[in-house]
Image (cartoon, rainbow, N blue to C red):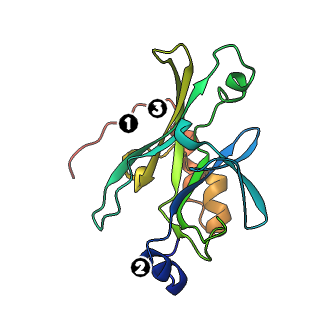
Amino acid sequence: MSALITPEMARALKEKRPLAALVELDHPDGLVRAWSGIGTLRYNGEDWYGLGIFGDVGPMVITTETVIQEITYSLSGIEPDQEELQFLNAFVRGRSGRQWLAALDEQGRVIKDPYELPSTRLDYQTQDVDDDGTAKVSVLAYAGFYTLERSIDECWTAEDQRKRYPNDSGFDLITSLTGKDIIWTRT
């Protein structure tokens, strides 16, 4: 992610060019590329599918503080019995999401170097039925320092220690301590 806006993007913003959101989600069935407009947008050699008013990303705040942000990617207007709903129900935890703020030129093409927003880690999906009977699928994701509040799911073994420090055999004694009661005393 680049923290700076390129001259091309700055010029487009100054000229008040139309803006678009680009989103790329690492889905178990393949990368999903979508944009906030209507129709297919060709950018960076890939097709980005327009979601129009049916897609939503939010909220995302750019800040210098060390915070964990919850971002929700939503897709609404899905018929509940469509097979696309099955595709959207896959396990997404730990996968990545990326998003950009893009400006469009007169022909509706993305102006060089859209601004990349902080990347996200996907967590889980939910499905709701809207008042009109259509389904809405939402994916909760975290941006920023989302790993600060997660425990480390790792156990250090003697083999792990030897990989990093070949001459260190201190962890070899750990297995002999399994199941033993150790009484600690003051010295």
Distance from the alpha carbon under mark 2 to that under mark 3: 70 Å
Residue pointed to by mark 2: 14
Q: Nearer the viewer, residue 16 or 42?
A: 16
Whether residue 5 is visible to the viewer of this picture, yes or no, is no
The reply to whether discs 1 and 3 touch (Cβ–Cβ < 8 Å) is yes
Residue pointed to by mark 3: 180
Q: Closer to the observer: label 2 or label 3?
A: 2
The part of the image, by quadrant, that contains residue 168 is: bottom right
Residue pointed to by mark 1: 182
- Amino acid type, label 3: Lys
Q: Residue at x 56, y 20 (%)?
A: 135
Q: Residue at x 67, y 63 (%)?
A: 163
Q: Nearer the viewer, residue 14 or 159?
A: 14
- Amino acid type, label 1: Ile
Q: Nearer the viewer, residue 147 or 8?
A: 8
Position in image of residue 114 (x %, y %): 56, 70
Horizontal placement of 87 versus 16: left or right?
A: right
Q: State the SS at label 1.
A: loop
Position in image of residue 183 (x %, y %): 32, 36
Q: Residue at x 67, y 23 (%)?
A: 85
- Amino acid type, label 2: Lys
The reply to whether discs 1 and 2 touch (Cβ–Cβ < 8 Å) is no
Horizontal placement of 12 versus 48: left or right?
A: left
Position in image of residue 119 (x %, y %): 52, 58
In the depicted structure, whether residue 55 falls above or below residue 45: above
Disc 1 packing (10 Å; few <14; some 14–19; many ≥20): few
Q: State the SS at label 3.
A: loop
Disc 3 packing (10 Å; few <14; some 14–19; many ≥20): few
Q: Closer to the observer: label 1 or label 2?
A: 2
Distance from the alpha carbon under mark 1 to that under mark 3: 6 Å
* Disc nearer the start of the sequence (2/3): 2
